[in-house]
């Protein structure tokens, strides 16, 4: 089965879910900041809070990070069942 | 070589990611005797301090907090160039014990540049409480450099950190060569670039492998440098290898390398760190409130407003006095006002003034000292307690980790005017002083947003302008005084919002600009360290006292002379004949439209002119010009109507804050055009807003 069938944007994940980053789309300075903060493909993120508007709060490597929705839309993830 | 291994003086750099506790540790190491170093061509603040250890002199260089060594920001570029320059004898990289996996990223990158590294694990006292146990020796063995746990709270490990740094500087510890990470399937490409560069090794200033890695990551600055040294052919070959990696792996090489580094860290740290499950504190639930729509922004604004209310009340009695007054408790209200810190200090200064005149007799000299210097400096100094209290509150928000939550909560409302949540830090700082606020815009990732903020942040009233607003308010009946303060701040934030919105809309139409975005780390909420809070308060107070002691002091003397000396260089008792009057007669017409008669207009015009240098000076100019001891008396003497005061308040709040702000806008934008445009914008908006306020107040 192709894993790409199960991918969604980070923006769409509900609070409390866990996912693995598949791809970060787009370019520009943002992307390098995300890499430096540990957001690279393969890394597991926990969605701490996503209330459907405003920044998505995630946890990566033990650190909470607020990510604007525009950017969260471009982070493609594969949900992990917990 | 002069740099012998036995020299007694060492230069040691300190770097770390944001929030790892770098500034705190730097201050402890240097005993708070740091100064801002003047680095040529660099506007980023680099602090340097000295300390002695076992008879060695150590010069510590505090580099800005960065996440990595790309050339993403000016800060990253400066830190990188400094480390590569060979100047530092050792580099201390600070890593947060509470999240080592992430913050080690900077350390591993530093290790790829130089072997002269010491790793300090900060907050080691808190690590145990958080259930984190770290095997420092194991990490040290794997990386080949000293690893030292330190704590700013308990001072554990401070001496051992310095000892290790000196060992590294002397070559007794640390690595001889930079650290090599195995990049796996990318290695062939890295070594191809390496062998291309090897031929030019003599002429290249940086470590070959590091250069190869950075070139693969797509470092434009370095690419240009290599093209300059090795020529077009080599540069093209390198670009071709990069393209090949992109094609084969279908990924940005920067992403691949970052991923490899984190994986490598995982291998090194994996069995060296043990985490025990910890329970979530009650703070956790409280902080979630910030992220809720509506509740979050309201909570943040309430905190900010509450902070300022408490600070104002302690200092000036306002707004508690008005509340008590309206409840019919007139005695209590006037007591609050009289025994506020500001009220007591004002009494003290006017007592000193009259004591000088009474004991030394009336002469031009006693007049200069009593009515020039003491009342001038005094009228500004009474605001010191306010500045201390406000700095304390801001320090608590920052050090506790509440500030970034507020940034997230206000991101939504702010993005409507094209500003991201990141802007909340410079915006809040602006309420204290515009100069550091403008420097703080560097952390804003979007360049266009930053340029817009450089233009609009000065609208936000700093404490100097608060001094003027409160002075104006003091001459009104208390209820109206409160309204004046509200008016001043509303006008300022309205101007900030409207101008931002216009610039943003214009930019969007022209370039199809993007929505403001936010990527912000949220450090765990914790109780702030007492000493760190005190440092913040003391730094701000020191800055203010220095200003009062130098600029305000000299201005007081200058203004006294301009006001008491006639153009024919003779003492005069009539300010109307003074040099100041002559200069400002040309400017007086600017305040005619708000109905100020020519006889008084020059006094106002002169005060506004002096206000260009520093806003506090508006108040002292008015007191000196009218020969009174407080702004309240000065304004009553001038007989301005409430409408005129309102119009003037709006003007004072919105026009160019001070010379220092203009200077920093220039140094940050590096553009005369941008700076002049900002000045013109502020003057224009301030003037129009003044006329509108006057017109509206007449109708009401």
Image: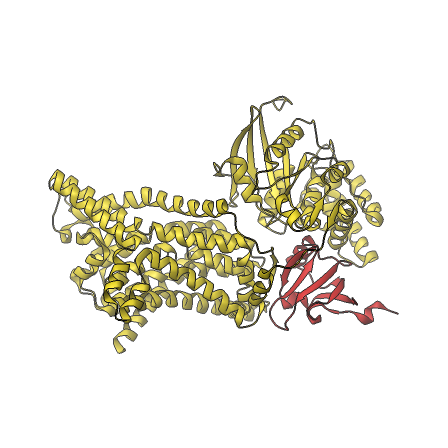
Q: Is residue B659 left or right of residue B283?
A: left
Q: Residue furthest bottom?
A: B699
Check the image and report above or below for B504 versus B431: below
Q: Is residue B281 left or right of residue B376?
A: right
Residue shown at the point (26%, 51%) measured from the top left: B344
Number of callouts = 0
Instruction: Between residue B499 and residue B180, name the one nearer to us.
Output: B180
Residue B443 lies, in percent from the top left, at 56, 54
Which quadrant holds residue B576?
bottom left
Check the image and report above or below for B127 versus B428: above
Tell me, by letter, which chain the rendering colours red. Answer: A
Tell me, by letter, which chain the rendering colours yellow. Answer: B
Residue shown at the point (49%, 44%) measured from the top left: B531
Q: Is residue B331 left or right of residue B213?
A: left
Residue B86 lies, in percent from the top left, at 64, 33
Residue B5 lies, in percent from the top left, at 65, 23
Residue A51 lies, in percent from the top left, at 63, 72
Check the image and report above or below for B440 versus B591: above
Instruction: Between residue B270 and residue B554, name the one nearer to us.
Output: B270
Check the image and report above or below for B676 versus B499: above
Q: Is residue B306 left or right of residue A44?
A: left
Residue shown at the point (53%, 65%) measured from the top left: B419
Instruction: Determine if residue B497 is in view.
Output: yes
Which quadrant holds residue A28?
bottom right
Which quarter of the rendered picture does the N terminus of chain B lie within?
top right
Instruction: Determine if residue B69 is in view.
Output: no
Which quarter of the rendered picture does the C terminus of chain B lie within?
bottom left
């Amino acid at each position: 089965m192709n894993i790409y069938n199960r991918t969604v944007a980070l923006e769409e994940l509900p609070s409390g879910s866990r996912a693995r980053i598949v791809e970060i789309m787009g370019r520009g300075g943002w992307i390098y900041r995300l890499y430096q903060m540990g957001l690279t493909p393969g890394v597991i993120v926990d969605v701490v809070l996503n209330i459907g508007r405003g920044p998505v709060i995630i946890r990566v490597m033990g650190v909470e990070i607020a990510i604007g929705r525009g950017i969260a839309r471009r982070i493609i993830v594969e949900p992990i069942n917990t | 070589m002069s740099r012998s291994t036995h020299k007694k003086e060492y230069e040691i750099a300190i770097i770390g990611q944001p929030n790892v506790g770098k500034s705190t540790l730097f201050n402890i190491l240097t005993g708070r005797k740091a100064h801002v170093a003047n680095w040529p061509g660099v506007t980023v603040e680099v602090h340097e301090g000295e300390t002695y250890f076992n008879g060695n002199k150590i010069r510590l260089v505090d580099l800005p907090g960065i996440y990595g060594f790309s050339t993403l920001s000016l800060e990253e570029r400066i830190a990188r160039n400094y480390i590569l320059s060979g100047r530092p004898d050792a580099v201390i990289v600070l890593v947060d014990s509470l999240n080592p996996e992430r913050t080690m990223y900077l350390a591993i990158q530093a290790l790829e540049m130089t072997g002269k590294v010491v790793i300090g694990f900060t907050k080691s006292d808190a690590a145990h409480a958080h259930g984190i146990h770290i095997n420092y020796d194991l990490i040290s063995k794997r990386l080949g450099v000293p690893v030292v746990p330190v704590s700013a709270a308990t001072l554990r490990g401070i001496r051992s950190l310095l000892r290790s740094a000196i060992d590294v500087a002397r070559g007794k510890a640390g690595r001889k060569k930079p650290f090599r990470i195995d990049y796996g399937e990318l290695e062939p490409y890295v070594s191809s670039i390496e062998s291309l560069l090897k031929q030019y090794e003599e002429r290249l200033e940086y470590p070959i492998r590091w250069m190869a890695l950075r070139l693969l990551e797509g470092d434009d600055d370095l690419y240009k440098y290599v093209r300059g040294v090795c020529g077009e052919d080599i540069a093209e070959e390198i670009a071709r290898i990069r393209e090949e990696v992109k094609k084969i792996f279908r990924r940005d090489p920067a992403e691949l390398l970052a991923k490899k580094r984190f994986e490598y860290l995982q291998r090194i740290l994996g069995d060296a760190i043990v985490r025990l499950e910890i329970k979530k504190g009650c703070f956790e639930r409280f902080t979630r409130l910030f992220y809720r729509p509506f509740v979050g922004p309201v909570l943040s604004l309430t905190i900010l407003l509450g902070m300022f209310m408490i600070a104002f009340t302690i200092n000036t009695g306002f707004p508690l006095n008005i509340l008590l007054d309206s409840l019919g408790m007139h005695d209590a209200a006037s007591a609050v006002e009289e025994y506020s810190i500001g009220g007591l200090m004002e009494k003290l200064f006017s007592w000193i003034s009259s004591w000088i005149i009474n004991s030394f007799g009336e002469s031009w000299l006693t007049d200069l000292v009593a009515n020039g210097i003491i009342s001038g400096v005094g009228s500004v100094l009474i605001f010191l307690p306010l500045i201390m209290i406000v700095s304390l509150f801001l320090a608590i928000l920052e050090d506790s980790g509440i500030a970034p939550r507020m940034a997230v909560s206000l991101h939504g409302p702010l993005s409507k005017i094209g500003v991201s949540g990141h802007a909340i830090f410079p915006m809040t700082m602006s309420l204290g002083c515009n100069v550091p606020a403008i420097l703080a815009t560097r952390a804003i990732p979007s360049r266009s947003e930053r340029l817009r903020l450089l233009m609009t942040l000065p609208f936000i009233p700093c404490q100097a302008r608060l001094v003027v607003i409160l002075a104006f308010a003091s001459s009104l009946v208390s209820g109206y005084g409160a309204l004046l303060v509200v008016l001043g701040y509303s006008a300022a934030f309205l101007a900030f919002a409207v101008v931002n919105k216009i610039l943003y809309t214009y930019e969007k139409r022209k370039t199809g600009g993007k929505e403001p975005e936010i990527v912000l780390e949220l450090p765990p909420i914790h109780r702030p360290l007492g000493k760190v809070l005190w440092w913040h308060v003391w730094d701000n107070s020191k800055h203010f006292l220095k200003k009062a002691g130098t600029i305000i002091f000299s201005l007081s003397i200058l203004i006294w002379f301009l006001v008491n000396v006639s153009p024919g260089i003779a003492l005069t008792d009539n300010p109307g004949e003074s040099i100041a009057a002559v200069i400002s007669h040309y400017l007086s017409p600017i305040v005619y439209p708000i109905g100020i008669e020519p006889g008084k207009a020059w006094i106002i015009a002169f005060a506004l002119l002096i206000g260009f240098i520093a806003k506090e000076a508006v108040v002292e100019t008015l007191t000196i010009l009218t020969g009174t001891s407080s702004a309240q008396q000065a304004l009553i003497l001038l007989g301005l109507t409430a409408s005129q005061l309102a119009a003037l308040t709006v003007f004072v709040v919105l026009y160019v804050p001070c010379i220092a702000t203009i200077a920093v806008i220039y140094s940050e934008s590096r553009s005369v055009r941008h700076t002049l445009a900002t000045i013109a914008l502020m003057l224009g908006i301030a003037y129009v807003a003044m006329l509108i306020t006057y017109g509206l107040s007449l109708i009401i």
